[in-house]
Amino acid sequence: MSGDGEYWEKNARRYDRATLLLNKNFSGMAQAVADAVAGSEDVLEIAAGTGLVTAAVVPVVGRHIATDRSPEMLEVLRGRLDGQANLEVRTADALDLDFEDGTFDAVLVCNLLHLLPEPWWRWPKLGVSSGPEDACSLPPSATGRV
């Protein structure tokens, strides 16, 4: 995956400020994602970063697993959401996830797709096959779980 680890290490503490400054609609997008998955029992967030979207989603779902490959970004996320009993934070690469099929009601992928080196709409291990209209929130598969 592109996106040098050194970049995220150096910029983790500045990421939120830059993201919110450059994208005035980010908070609204995060709330829209939370609204879309509200009531889901099991949610996977791929590339959760510092938890800007996670913070909106965690209060409205059952179990939320937030993943990112950058320990520094996840350190910021943990500081933001410390004490959330339904949140599990894991260091993981988006292209090398280790979850059983049918584990999740929803899979969230926000602000990552432009960093992926291969077609992002294929996460075969999760059974996800989606298109650009689902860039931020991938809905449940036909079986209801992904």
Image (spheres, helix red, strand yellow):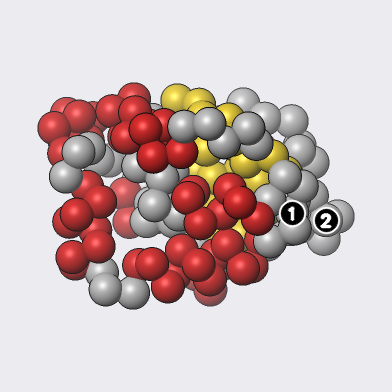
* Residue 109 location (% of width, % of height): 49, 53
Kind of element beneath mark 2: loop
Residue at the image point whose x is 68% and y is 61% from the top: 38
Residue closest to the eye, 47 or 84: 84
Residue closest to the eye, 79 or 41: 79
* Residue 49 location (% of width, % of height): 37, 42
Q: Is residue 125 left or right of residue 51?
A: right
Which quadrant would the N terminus be assigned to in this image? top left
Q: Which mark is residue 144?
A: 2
Q: Amino acid at mark 1?
A: Ser
Residue at the image point whose x is 19% and y is 54% from the top: 17
* Residue 24 location (% of width, % of height): 26, 73
* Residue designated by label 1: 40
Q: CA distance from mark 2 to mark 1?
A: 11 Å
Q: Is residue 94 left or right of residue 50?
A: right
Q: Amino acid at mark 2?
A: Gly
Whether residue 127 is visible here, answered yes or no, is no
Residue at the image point whose x is 27% and y is 40% from the top: 2
Whether residue 61 is visible here, answered yes or no, is yes
- Above or below for 28 versus 85: below
Kind of element beneath mark 1: loop
Q: Residue furthest right?
A: 143
